[in-house]
Image (cartoon, helix red, strand yellow):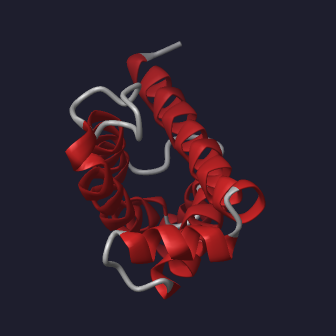
Amino acid sequence: MSNEQLTANGTALLRITLGIAAIAHGLLKVFVFTLPGTAGFFESLGLPGFLAYITAFVEIVGGLALIVGFQTRLVSLAMVPILLGAMWAHSGNGWVFSNQGGGWEYPLFWAVVLVVQAMLGSGTFAVDDMQARKTPANV
């Protein structure tokens, strides 16, 4: 396999993994904490409760978009504020995410990885790639 192929496949693996993790976090808010419970948590932090619903939606829909490789750059960047918000929410718990209440390094790492994904694009096996091949300039 060439370096280009390895990079494209690695980019796709990163994209799909980010999508799966995002969906898992969104569904955790829906099925474990419940959306009203998550809204209550957001309110306890001084945030509007409706942001919990938006956050879960962005995580689930954004995760699906990442898995299929649809608008990968845009979706990756759109998810960064969610992770920066999570970093802020966990900032009082210290650096290590295994601390009670979770630390802030994991959301920071995830935000940086989303920026990297936006820089890399979709990689292989992506709707974006299929759409790019169908444009008139590439026909």
Q: For the image shown, how many numbered marks are present on the structure?
A: 0
Q: Which of 32 and 132 is in front in this view?
A: 32
Residue 14: percent from the left, percent from the top? Answer: 49, 35
Question: Above or below — where is 86 with respect to 6?
Answer: below
Name the residue: 71% across, 57% down: 27
Question: Above or below — where is 1 with respect to 89?
Answer: above
Q: Which residue lies furthest to the top in this view?
A: 1
- From the image, which quarter does the C terminus lie in? bottom right
Question: Above or below — where is 80 with respect to 101?
Answer: below
Q: Which of 56 and 122 is in front in this view?
A: 56
| Quarter holding residue 79 | bottom left
Residue 127: percent from the left, percent from the top? Answer: 64, 60
Q: Which of 29 and 99 is in front in this view?
A: 99
Name the residue: 63% across, 59% down: 26
Residue 88: percent from the left, percent from the top? Answer: 24, 57
Name the residue: 29% across, 43% down: 116
Q: Residue furthest right?
A: 31
Residue 51: percent from the left, percent from the top? Answer: 46, 80
Residue 120 visible to an observer of this rendering = yes
Residue 130 visible to an observer of this rendering = no
Name the residue: 40% across, 85% down: 48
Question: Above or below — where is 69 with respect to 52?
Answer: above
On the picture, is 65 further left or further right than 5? Answer: right
